[in-house]
Amino acid sequence: MPSIAQLGHVALVTPNLEKSLWYMRDVLGMEVVAEEGDKLYLRCYQELEHHSLVLSEGPEAVCEHVGWRVGAPEDVQAYAEQLRAAGVDVTEHDGGPGHGESIRFHTPGGEHPFELFYDVERPATKGPERSLVPSNSRPRTGLGPRRIDHVNLWTSADTVASTEQWMSEQLGFKRREYVQPTGAPLVASWMSVTPQVHDVAVMTDFGTNSPGRFHHVAFNMECFSDVLTAADHLRDRGVQIDLGPGKHGIGQAMFLYTRDPGSGHRIELYAGGYFIFAPDWEPILWNEENMDTGLVYYGPPFSPDPSHPMTPTTACARQEVSA
Amino acid sequence: MPSIAQLGHVALVTPNLEKSLWYMRDVLGMEVVAEEGDKLYLRCYQELEHHSLVLSEGPEAVCEHVGWRVGAPEDVQAYAEQLRAAGVDVTEHDGGPGHGESIRFHTPGGEHPFELFYDVERPATKGPERSLVPSNSRPRTGLGPRRIDHVNLWTSADTVASTEQWMSEQLGFKRREYVQPTGAPLVASWMSVTPQVHDVAVMTDFGTNSPGRFHHVAFNMECFSDVLTAADHLRDRGVQIDLGPGKHGIGQAMFLYTRDPGSGHRIELYAGGYFIFAPDWEPILWNEENMDTGLVYYGPPFSPDPSHPMTPTTACARQEVSA
Amino acid sequence: MPSIAQLGHVALVTPNLEKSLWYMRDVLGMEVVAEEGDKLYLRCYQELEHHSLVLSEGPEAVCEHVGWRVGAPEDVQAYAEQLRAAGVDVTEHDGGPGHGESIRFHTPGGEHPFELFYDVERPATKGPERSLVPSNSRPRTGLGPRRIDHVNLWTSADTVASTEQWMSEQLGFKRREYVQPTGAPLVASWMSVTPQVHDVAVMTDFGTNSPGRFHHVAFNMECFSDVLTAADHLRDRGVQIDLGPGKHGIGQAMFLYTRDPGSGHRIELYAGGYFIFAPDWEPILWNEENMDTGLVYYGPPFSPDPSHPMTPTTACARQEVSA
Amino acid sequence: MPSIAQLGHVALVTPNLEKSLWYMRDVLGMEVVAEEGDKLYLRCYQELEHHSLVLSEGPEAVCEHVGWRVGAPEDVQAYAEQLRAAGVDVTEHDGGPGHGESIRFHTPGGEHPFELFYDVERPATKGPERSLVPSNSRPRTGLGPRRIDHVNLWTSADTVASTEQWMSEQLGFKRREYVQPTGAPLVASWMSVTPQVHDVAVMTDFGTNSPGRFHHVAFNMECFSDVLTAADHLRDRGVQIDLGPGKHGIGQAMFLYTRDPGSGHRIELYAGGYFIFAPDWEPILWNEENMDTGLVYYGPPFSPDPSHPMTPTTACARQEVSA
């Protein structure tokens, strides 16, 4: 059976590339590894692979796709066959900058665009500075996000359960924690193929009930203190903070939800959390009795109200933005 | 093929159980989950499983065994067969407190005693306090170690390479980082079955060149700041600090090496570090050119000199301490 | 001219002494230095003086008085004369446990009860543990508050300006930062006799407009991370958190407002902040244009609404609770 | 009696201004407020005054002078008279960039050059970024030193006691903590005019026994975690770290001693510590019994050996470097 090994990258379209680049490169401190065609390829200082973020300019802020790295070279084709057998529309792509051949498809209902690939390049930094630590691609810089951590995707109330089930059956994501009020359908699920509590979360869009919304991509910070320092910097530079700093009960990590000022894409800065090494993990249920603790263990209150700044701000691309 | 899923526990013998208990329970804050026969079973606040530490009193401070949890119920017997086929002396054991049937054996040369098991109990805390966070077995307390992290085993110069190779071939541990001076044999290797940089390290005992030494067990802390706070507490309570606080280049984690005052067993308090999700990770080589950065990226200098407080202080048990 | 040197202590009455003691001693980690009559005397680990908190049981949670240490032995009597000359009702008291003779009086309108004293005892801890650091009275313990920091007193809208002016003229507190909407009277003032931004704040009670309310006493923590760790502990032990963790723009400190579960007195855990060494500091004005940044630079939103958990919960004693 | 209010600035000469500027401005994040003649004037983000560091290029790395701000306008002339009456050679200077008229002189033996001034300019940043926090001159940047903290001056064994006594009698510095082995003369003293444990330390130069050495200037960081992050950055950028990170027992602060790569001047990054508000503070004695705890409470070992990287690296200017 093919498997997914890890989250690889997100490809985001921004109406204001210059401003997004200011945020991602100059403030957060990501490295621009390559610029090809209309696309910029960026990575964090602890990523040896070519990129974890693709930025391009376009009329509307959308998430073009989420890229997953599979566990073995043959898994790309194996997934292509498996998904086609399941009735999914799969397109095949030559290798782009930084990675080899890939397939692309959407989750059921045609909503969340995924890419699968295996081969990656691991270029040395083009910058003048080498890190003394070979597991880093260059010295820490900016606010210090060190790697991509997870994505959070929202969908309509009637598709969240089926999307989650599909991601489990077709792609192998395991449910780790979930929200399901007593006697009601699934509201949200945190899923992973790694020991992280989630590589991806799937949630109900209470506000607009739209399918195919992109809620956020999270980058991992080394320490809780880095999240506080980031809050300090971002507040003083006028970057919108939607929620945080605070700590989730679900996953036990510190959070700070910010907005890329060029696009409105929500970027989470995320630190800590627990890891699941048990092969027989029993998913943790959250419901009406303890949800307050789940989303915010300590910190500012979260509300799923559509007027709350935490509602999804951008959409996933339904078709290929750039074929 | 059977697999190992995670480090489960260490069983340590201490000449002064009361003092060891003061350190582990009263200072570090571990929970005594059970007391059966002459053994105490302890766990950290983020561990749902029955125990990660077994303490018993004995004339000499030894590591009785290191317990690994396998990936599936049938893996215990599968490993028994595989290891016997490889000429290893394997004993079978009924389930003890907290886990089911197990097998025990020593690594080649008869040096490092390992136990493999699958079934575990996950008892609720017997204490009065329940955590609001279901992924914790109880509220954080003491200095806040949250889970067992890894073990570090030392052996003689001429067996380190063979032991490492055996652990790779027989047990599936992958080499992540290693020390090998140019033109010389392997000196040390950090290995894991999880995305951690190491679940176990195997190193050369420069000082005494003894096989079968137990260097330390590490417990994971949430943040770098927890390591600093622990250093503050321990220094003021007379607990010996061998090295730290500081940061490793290898693994990128904060370290604080302390000694259990009841036994002299070295206990590392450990935080942070990077994770390896890539299925094709290229092990990182350290040698005479960059070793300074490897062991201590910043912090107090480390020396492998036999007079250094960081030499192994206790041994691994060669036979079953309590059959 | 007499002067005030520092905040010495607060004397709080609690309806549930046992529960307050659980919070102050067992959770926060303060030392009970003495117990005399119906009063308990506590201090933090970095305080060499006898106490910074007096607890006694009574029918109602009130702040009995705020104790200030003056700059010289003769200042106690000098203040007695000066205040009486200003028409203030001053009572004289023999030394109580831990400090010498004192005077007591209320701020104008008879609202906030103050005590002034000079002589203090500096007893060694009665506990078994001595700190290796002579500037600490014992090793750090519990959540680690290290010293009393400041008090926050609320009063009615029409007395805040006069109370502030009186504290400046009679007691020598200097205005450091203040809130005053354009064209409106003073709303709040942060004042100090030390380089701290405030030893005391005086604020308008928007909600009830009561004079003589006690808003909180703050204890100083070593680091921002200690505030986060405290939030973690307190949340999981059911202690109410009114606001935080977050960072003030005014004073630049981290805050966590909690409630003593025995009394409802608000206890702030406070870390960091800037210091004013300039002899010609120009007080910083906050008004309708930047108030959001002032109270909460980052963190959960604060509202002065009477329904907000941050309204004053307890009163100051108008007469001597225990003469 | 005139008084000193606070440490104002240090004026350092560097053989490689470009490299020093890279360190101070580009790495640490200080702002270059003015450039006049051959001098650059820099400040930290929490300093509203014109500068706390003056840099100029010269053949040798020396500390040209240490600038202290006095408590009142008339104190400059009052000190001039007092010092001349005490036989000190005092020169008078017109206001330079950023501050008004000043006097300059050397401590006894002609060793440590001091400047006293009162009037200061408080210019808005010339940079494009304004801080939302009015007590900051601009948003935090770089590694985040927020203000000058203290200076550390070394002298010969036979002048340390007399220098310390002179600084107390003539300038009003109070002894806070000190090292004096039993039956031996004073070795080191931490002194202040503020509640800080030291604004200045005077120490014996064991190694070279030179008078008039400049040991370091310290800049204050917000949190312990900032010191760790700084260590990470500096290590990876090849900046020499002489000692740390670690915590002093004396003063209870975190330390990281680094070297300006342009000059070899030692720059300490310093966080935390306790404050002395008591008007009758009893200086703390350290001697042969507890010195280990004093200099390094936890962290790497310090040795006063002349071969240790912590010996003084640069000298104080004996005559005016630029009259």
Image (tube, coloured by chain):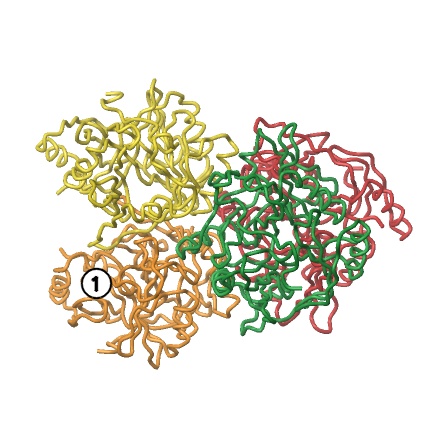
Chain colours: A red, B green, C orange, D yellow
Residue drawn at (55%, 50%), measured in percent from left and top? B271
Asked if A252 appears above or below B87 in the picture, the reply is below
Q: Quadrant of the C terminus of chain A?
A: top right
Q: Tally the marks.
A: 1
Label 1's element? loop
Q: Quadrant of residue D88?
A: top left
- Using a 10 Å C-alpha cutoff, classify the residue at mark 1 as few (fewer than 14 neighbours), some (14 to 19) or many (20 or more): many
Residue A60 shows up from this direction: no
Q: Quadrant of residue A47?
A: top right
Left or right: A247 as drawn, with respect to D164: right
Query: What x and y, as percent, mark residue A153?
Result: 71, 53
Q: Is residue B122 above or below residue C250?
A: below
Residue A136 image point, x, y percent:
61, 37
Looking at the picture, tell me which residue is in the foreground, D24 or B302. Answer: B302
Location of residue A72 in the rendering, given as x and y in whole percent from the top left corner: 80, 42
On screen, residue B27 versus residue C322, left or right, reads: right
Which is more toward the observer, B111 or D217?
Answer: B111
Left or right: D286, with C245 as reference point: left
* Residue C316 vs residue A136, the one in the foreground: A136
Q: Extreme left residue here?
A: D85
Residue marked by disc 1: C120
The vertical placement of D243 against D272, above or below, is above
Task: Name the amino acid, label 1.
Answer: Val
As drawn, the residue found furthest toward the top would be D59
Q: Nearer the viewer, residue A143 or A27?
A: A143
